[in-house]
Every structure is written in C-alpha cells, then in structure tokens.
C-alpha cells in the first residue's frame, strides 16, 4: 500500500491523530494507498513553518537566486517525469497520453514560466511636482504577500496546484498546499523535488485532508495565512470567501463554469468537430472550461450532430497505461453518481440521447471503475438541469440557433462566465464575439490554446480575480509605493 504523508518544513510527517483515508484507483475502484489526514496540529505546524521561512534564508535570498531555484523545480520535475506521470494517472485514472502532454509538462512549465516572467516585470514610477520646486520621485516595489494557502482540485492536480505555487514562490511567498483528498500524490511528491533543488525548508508545505471540518477549513480559517488562492466549485468558493473575510485576507478564486460554444454556418466543419471532441470530452469532461453547451446554426445543426456522434463513438475507454485507449474514468464514485444523475435528469426531461447515456461495458479488471459513456443530448429546454447546471462530465447538450443575436443571448444566459469558444471563418464576427460574450476567456477556432502571459479567470460565479502573466502578480505580491521628496 502506498502511503501519502504531509510535507512540513522539508520533512514527510504522518498525522498525530493517526487518522488516514483511502486513495482509490478510479479505473477499478480499488484502494491502492492510504493518505494521512491533517488535524489542526499539522495545519498549525505547516503555517508556522511557512511563516518562519519567510523570515529566514528564503526571505533574505536575492531575487536572482530565488528565481534560479524556482526554475530548477521545473527542470527536476521534467527529470522525474515518469514518476509524476504514473502518480497523476493512478490518482485520476486519466490516460498517460493526456497527462504526458498536458498535466506533467505544464506542471513543470508553471515554475519555469513564472521564474522568467517575474524577473522581467516592471513597476511604475512618477515624478511629482512639489510647491518648493524640488519635486519628488514615486516608484513601486513588489513585495511577497506572505504565507499563502493554496487549495487545489482533483481534475488537473499537478497543473492547477503549480499554476499557483509557481507564481507564489517566484514572488517570494511561502505556501501551504491542500491538494484534493482524491488526488494527493503529486503534491506530496513535489516536496522531494523542493528538497532536491535546495528550496529552503518551510517554503513549500503540503497538508492532506478534506474540506469542511478538516485540513481545508483549518487552513483557510487560519489567522496566520495572508491570502488564499483556490480552484474548485463555485459553492466552495463562497465558503472560502467567507473564511477569508475574517482578518480581511485577499482571495483569488477560479471556480466553475457552464461553458458555451457557438458554431456558425461558415465554420470549418472538420476543425469544429475535432475541436469539440477535445473541448467536450478531454479528461473525461473534467476541465473547468470544457464545453457543456453547443449552439449550432440551424442549417448545419444536423450535420454537426451526426458527425460529432460518429466521432464520439470512436472513443476507447481504458486503463491509463493502455496506449490503445484515449478516455479515462471519472475521478470518483461520488462524481460518477453525480454525472449519472444528470444522465437520468436528461432522460426525464425528454432529451434525445444521441449517443451514450449510461455506463460502458468494461473488461472484468476495470468493472469496479467509475466509467461513464461519452454522451450527447439534443432537445432539452435551456432551463433543464443538464442544459444549465455544471455537470463536469463527458456530456453536452446541442441546440440550434438562427441569428447571431440569438446565439449570443443563449451563450450569455448563465450565472457563470468562464470560457467560451466560437467557430467561424468571419474575422469581423470573431471580433464582435470578443466584445459581447460575457466570459473571462474566449477561444476562436480553438480551445485550451494557452499562452501563460495571458489573463486566466472568469466572471460572475466563475471566480474572482485573474491569474496568469502580470495579472497573477496582483494577488501573489503586494505593491508598495515609495515616495522620495527631493
Ligand atoms: P471542490 O470545490 O469540491 O474542491 C476543491 C478543493 O477545495 C479540494 O481540495 C477540497 O478538499 C477543498 N475544499 C472543499 N470544501 C472546502 C472548505 N469548506 N474549505 C476549504 N477547502 C475546501 O472542487 P473539485 O470537485 O475538487 O473540482 C471540481 C470543480 O472545480 C468544478 O466545479 C470545476 O469547474 C472547478 N474548477 C475550476 C477551475 C478554474 O480554473 N476556474 C479549474 C478546475 C476546476
Ligand atoms: O491552463 C491553465 O493555466 C489552467 N489554469 C487551466 C485550468 C483548467 C481547469 O480545469
């Protein structure tokens, strides 16, 4: 049995209480490891270690040295690529073909990118007139915010955790990470990397456990945490925002979505089909800006549905290390039940199930896993739950539209505002969509095409703040103005 421990002050430690929970393989439902559950003692120790590290070698280190260490983290993850890959795939069930192209390389790149980016980030300066004529010079300096709590989800565990830890460390903060209870391993493994490259003790800490009445709540409620960066469900975001209000701590929240795509009748149909195969079904539908609502111009609607159905029926679900497979299971039994409950609601609402709608037949050794069929519905009302609530599974509702105005109104009719994609050859229309779609991120003729210099985040119930590029520095550093009277 694999055992996953906390990483506190540069050392792996178990829970004083002895409490542990199961790590379950989503592909077969079997327990393959035990994870220590942090109580207040471990959370207090991790926060204290992070506080002390701020004032120790890390706090005194030159920016150049600090950034060179952060860069080495990226290099070391890549040197230990296969270990990270196996750990991530066992925790999540996702195919190695996906994790080796997305999760692990991006998990490493998040350190390399922010190490370079922070080095080159300028601050402002102003010359100010004064009555005596001598004037004053104002200039900004960016300082670390302090001890940051990083609360991460299970869908892209290493990528989404390092997306926060990378800029946090590059800016000179220290962190206490609480990975999802479902996918704890890569966050723990990263502790070894931190030690190997010489990141001082206490800069990177990990505590394991659940949310309410467990490590997540103890950490976010901890008075010595200076800020909380969270990715997860919108409902959890509300709870975390309340916890942050005590002590007036800042938050960065990357939350849920019900992301639309608009397919216009001038779109490149081949590209649109390929794009939707990814945007709906990649990672078994468990990506925050996955497309869950597709609106297709009426004259190409039936062709689009038929072609997508034919392509979807080619997916091959299977084990993470089976190269002939390209679709994993859902991450947990609880999540499988949630997704299946939407399959049921869709049928009850009278949807046409174009394909899928159930659990696939799997070979005997995988029958205990959390599998669901990739699913397409048509014919739902916009107010039916599967058409308007985030499902976070490999399923989509497709509906026709007639005019551009109607398509925009349908896309914007949601409390979320994370991502959207538009498929058209009309450049002017593409720019118009950039103005009117109420989302944080719009992709035209693409999806999940990432440039880490760009802003990342959502509107409305999809989040608070932006990470990425210079935007993340608003959260990961404090801007100080220095005014010098000449
Ligand atoms: P979740 O909100 O259930 O859990 C996320 C993390 O929060 C976990 O580590 C969990 O233990 C912790 N947590 C739960 N309750 C808590 C509490 N009361 N206090 C402190 N911590 C608590 O989300 P999930 O199920 O892990 O992830 C799926 C959700 O995340 C989906 O809604 C998805 O859209 C969203 N998501 C958003 C983005 C984005 O960038 N916007 C990215 C990935 C996932
Ligand atoms: O690509 C990224 O930087 C990022 N944060 C992706 C988020 C995916 C959500 O599931």
Image (spheres, grey):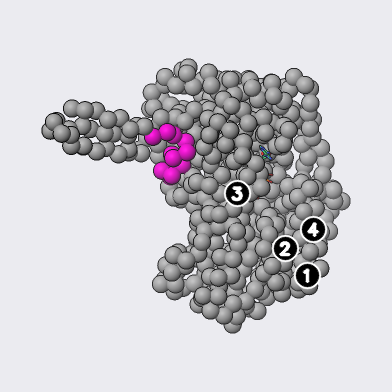
Does the residue tagged 3 have its C-beta within 8 Å of any atom of ligand 1? yes
Q: Where does label 1 land, which residue? A: 349
Circles 4 and 3: CB atoms closer than 8 Å:
no
Q: Which residue is mark 4?
A: 341
Residue 239 placement, left or right of 115: right
Callout 4 environment at 10 Å: few (<14), some (14 to 19), or many (20+)?
A: few
**Residue at the disc numbered 3:** 255
Between the C-alphas of marks 1 and 4, the distance is 12 Å
**Cβ atoms under marks 1 and 3 closer than 8 Å:** no
Name the residue at 61% across, 56% down.
257
Q: Mark 2 or mark 1, which is nearer the start of the sequence?
A: 1
Disc nearer the start of the sequence (3/2) = 3
| Residue matched to label 2 | 385
Residue 161 appears at what percent x and percent y? 58, 39
Residue sitting at x 63%, y 45%: 238
Residue 425: horizontal and vertical position, in percent?
Answer: 46, 73
């Amino acid at each position: 049995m694999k055992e996953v421990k906390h990483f506190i002050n540069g050392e792996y430690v178990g829970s004083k209480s002895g409490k542990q929970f199961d790590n379950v393989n989503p592909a077969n439902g079997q327990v393959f490891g035990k994870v220590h559950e942090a109580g207040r003692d471990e959370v207090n120790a991790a926060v204290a270690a992070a506080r002390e590290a701020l004032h120790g070698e890390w706090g005194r280190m030159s920016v150049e040295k600090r950034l060179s260490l952060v860069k080495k983290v990226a290099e070391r993850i890549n040197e230990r690529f296969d270990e990270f890959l196996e750990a991530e795939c066992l925790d999540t069930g996702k195919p190695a073909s996906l994790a080796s192209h997305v999760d692990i390389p991006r998990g490493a790149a998040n350190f390399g990118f922010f190490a370079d980016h922070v080095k080159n980030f300028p601050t402002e300066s102003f010359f100010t007139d004064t009555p005596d004529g001598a004037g004053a010079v104002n200039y900004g300096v960016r300082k670390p915010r302090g001890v940051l709590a990083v609360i991460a989800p299970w869908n892209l565990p290493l990528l989404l955790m390092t997306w926060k830890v990378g800029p946090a460390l590059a800016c000179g903060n220290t962190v206490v990470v609480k990975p999802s209870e479902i996918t704890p391993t890569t966050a723990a493994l990263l502790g070894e990397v931190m030690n190997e490259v010489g990141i001082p003790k206490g800069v990177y800490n990990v505590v394991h456990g659940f949310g309410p009445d467990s490590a997540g709540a103890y950490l976010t409620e901890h008075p010595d945490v200076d800020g909380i960066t969270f990715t997860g469900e919108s409902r959890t975001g509300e709870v975390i925002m309340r916890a942050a209000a005590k002590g007036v701590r800042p938050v960065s929240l990357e939350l849920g979505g019900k992301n639309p795509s608009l397919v216009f009748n001038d779109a490149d149909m081949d590209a649109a089909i390929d794009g939707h195969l990814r945007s709906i079904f990649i990672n078994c539908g468990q990506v925050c800006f996955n497309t869950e609502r597709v609106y297709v111009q009426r004259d190409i609607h039936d062709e689009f549905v038929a072609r997508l159905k034919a392509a979807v029926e080619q997916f091959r679900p299977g084990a993470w290390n089976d190269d002939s497979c390209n679709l994993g299971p859902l991450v947990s039994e609880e999540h499988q039940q949630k997704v299946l409950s939407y399959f049921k609601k869709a049928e009850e609402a009278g949807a046409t199930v174009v394909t899928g709608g159930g659990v696939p037949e799997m070979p005997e050794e995988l029958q205990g896993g959390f599998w669901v069929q990739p699913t397409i519905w048509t014919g739902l009302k916009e107010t039916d739950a599967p058409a308007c609530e985030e499902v976070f599974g490999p399923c989509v509702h497709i509906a026709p539209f007639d005019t551009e105005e109607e398509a925009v109104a349908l896309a914007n009719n949601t409390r979320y505002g994370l991502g959207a994609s538009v498929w058209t050859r009309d450049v002017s229309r593409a720019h118009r969509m950039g103005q009117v779609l109420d989302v944080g991120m719009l992709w035209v003729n693409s999806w999940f095409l990432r440039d880490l210099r760009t802003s990342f985040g959502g509107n409305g119930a999809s989040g608070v703040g932006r990470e990425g590029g210079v935007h993340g520095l608003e959260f990961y550093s404090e801007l100080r103005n220095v005014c010098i009277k000449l």
